[in-house]
Image: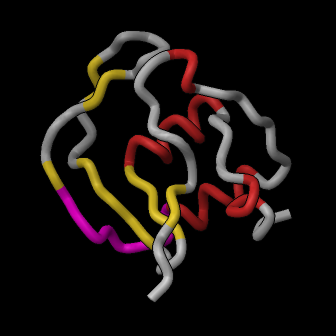
Amino acid sequence: MTKKKPICQAIKTKSDVRESKLGCKGRILAYLNSFESSYVATGFFVDVMTGKHLYPDCLEAYTDGSWYWDTVDIYYFEMYDNELDPEFVSQFV
């Protein structure tokens, strides 16, 4: 059994957000949003860049069998172009 890897590092502070402009951003977002969630929880998270509390309908976790990500990972990638694991990104370039 292969151990799943995170698509990016956990975001805890502003310095954890590392911008990485990708020409394939749309394809990656479509891929990340195409999966059924593996886990669902209610709650919120704080945008470390703005300090705002964000209340999505739910917090969800996803996997494609090799990689894993969650609602927060998608948010930071979509909003701030947060850097994703280069090995994960290589599937889309």
**Residue at 59%, 40% in the rendered image:** 77
| Drawn side of residue 19 relative to residue 33, left or right | right
The N terminus appears in which quarter of the rendering? bottom left
Query: Is 12 in front, or is 52?
Result: 12
Image check: 56 left or right of 90?
Answer: left
Q: Quadrant of the C terminus?
A: bottom right
Magenta highlight: main SS? loop
- Work out whether 1 lies above or below 82: below
Q: Is 24 situated above or below 92?
A: above
Decide which of 44, 16 is in the foreground and name it.
16
Residue 41 picture location, percent across and down: 15, 52
Q: In this rendering, is residue 80 above or below 78? A: above
Task: State the extent of the magenta-drawn residues as a range.
Answer: 33-40
Where residue 5 sits: x, y (%)?
Answer: 52, 63
Q: Residue furthest bottom?
A: 1
Q: Residue 47 is drawn in which quadrant?
A: top left
Residue ID at (71%, 29%): 19
Magenta-span inclusion, residue 37: yes
Colouring convention used in this rendered image of the protein? secondary structure
* Picture coordinates of residue 60, whole percent (x, y): 29, 56
Tell me: 80 left or right of 58: right
From this view, report whether residue 89 is shown above or below residue 44. below
Asked if the stretch drawn in magenta spans residue 70, the answer is: no
In the rendered view, does 29 fall on the left or right side of 47? right
Name the residue rendered at 45%, 57% in the picture. 69
